[in-house]
Amino acid sequence: MQEQQEKSVPNFNLAPKKIKIAKSIKHVNYLCDNQLTFLEKHELSDICIIASDDVEFHAHKIILSAGSDFFRTMFNGALMESKAVQVKIKEVNGDILKLILIFIYTGAIDLQTDTVEDILRAAKFFQIKALIEECYNFMFEELDCSNCLGIVLFADQHDLKELHEKATLFAILNFEKVANNDEFLQLTGDQIDMIISHKDLYVESEETVFLSLMKWMEHDKPNREKDAFKLFSHVRYWSLSSNFIQQQRDKLPKQIECLLMICDWLAWHLAPNSSGLESREFSKDKLVVIVKDQMHTYNPKLDTWTSETLPGFPLSFDKILETNNKLIVQVNDSLKCYDLQSKELTSLPQLDIPRSDFGLAMLNHELYVVGGLSTGKKAWIRLMDKFNFSLNEWQTVSPMNGKFFYPSVAVADGLLHVVNEETNLIHCFNPHSNEWTHKNLPQNSPTSNYCFSNVKEKLVIVGGQLWDNPISNSVSILCNGLWNKCEMRLALSKPKCTSWNNRLIICGGYDNTNTLQNFIQEYNPESKKLKTLAALDHFNDSYDIITIPNRNT
């Protein structure tokens, strides 16, 4: 008998025991679909949920309890609803309750801007944590200058601390645009006080704060004058000019406190004393990327980009410079001027010898065009012209020594520095003496497709093609005749660069597969380190990065 038992046990020589936790998304979806069918067709239901407007839903206690802490407490506790066959929910109407139940049964919901606040209120009421998080994420994504104040008020009313903090931070970091929306004019004095008194209020000039308060007060002057002294006391008058205060003083209410406040402001300007006075952190120069007709402005505190369309801006261009709030745009062999205030595009006078592929730079408020390929003869020329904006005319300056192929230009130490793809020289132009000098480029310099720029008055070459053909991944700063190098995250050809707040910003460029990259890097010449800023989507071959100086500080 024992022998027969031993023979009946097969010997498989099994491998060591293996465990796998398998989870079928297909089956989860199958369950959700069936649960939703039960809800819609009233199958096997054991509870009727009645909304505030008497809309009825035939549901299932076990599914409701699994998806909502509110229902779990209701049906599992000693409450009389645990035995009931119908329950009235007076706090939620039928349309919103239907969406809530669908989420409980399937984990999916259709969030829209006009219903998300009602859904979030209901999610808080029913204690559905996953849905609260989805609503938060949706509202964070939709947060902009036109709705952030409304979201602040909504979050305040419903004690949504995380949402309140996020929306408030957005409002104070984008105050100038926020204050231009109707929402701002509808705020109460206390709500204005909360924003205007914030220590991190981020503006381009203190005049913005003053004028925004004036606009708010004028919207309902009889009822708002009583708040004037409290609100205007937050204005940092030491950052206003005495001329501005003189111009605006008669517009303030004639309350004795306001009159004394203006007297104090003017008295301070007569005998300034900065002791104990903290200036607001004004925004610094603007970092701007232009892709086709879209201008993207960087917010360094949020590490985000805000976008706006430039009506009438060229969709294809070679290079962009900024001067006095105008954009100089190189389009093939012509130059355009785009006014950022009027949004108007005009053409600069044609060069005496039309040409393309020229170098372009601003020096001492004058525009320089360096070399280029003549449009008619298709020959490289050594002429250099400068444009006098006051006279609206081109003037020829001292020509370069030799022809320049695809010249690149950078400004440093009051000089114009020019390099090209055919020589290992840096040609330097002194606008005061109208003379050229030159010096050698260090060894191992890229020979083409690099960006030639400057940071803190030092010349920089970024990326480009090396003599033996590979693409460089270096940021090279010229110091005492040698390159000080820092490696980028990726080798790049044809990147775009600008100097911004004593940092070098590197934008885009093509990798080894000739794919245009959309990441943006910041190089700190002090620490000699690179960090990556928020990327930009929808890059296009027509793009450039520039700095727009803050002329209010």
Image: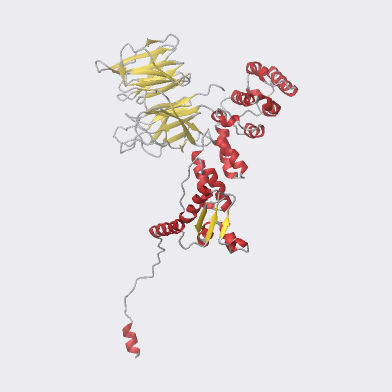
Quadrant that contains the C terminus: top right
247 lies above or below 543: above
Residue 425: % across, % down: 35, 23
458 lies above or below 348: below
Left or right: 148, with 257 as reference point: left
* Image quadrant where residue 322 sits: top left
Left or right: 437, with 211 as reference point: left
Q: Which of 427 and 184 lies nearest the eye of the viewer?
A: 184
> In the displayed image of the protein, which residue is found farthest to the right?
256
Residue 427: % across, % down: 37, 20
Quadrant that contains the N terminus: bottom left
Q: Which of 19 and 454 lies nearest the eye of the viewer?
A: 19
* Image quadrant where residue 505 sits: top left
Way the structure is coloured: secondary structure
> In the displayed image of the protein, which residue is found farthest to the front?
54
**Residue 365 seen in render:** yes
455 lies above or below 100: above
Q: Which of 275 and 190 lies nearest the eye of the viewer?
A: 190
Q: Which of 499 and 290 lies nearest the eye of the viewer?
A: 290
Residue 95: % across, % down: 51, 47
Residue 278: % across, % down: 65, 29
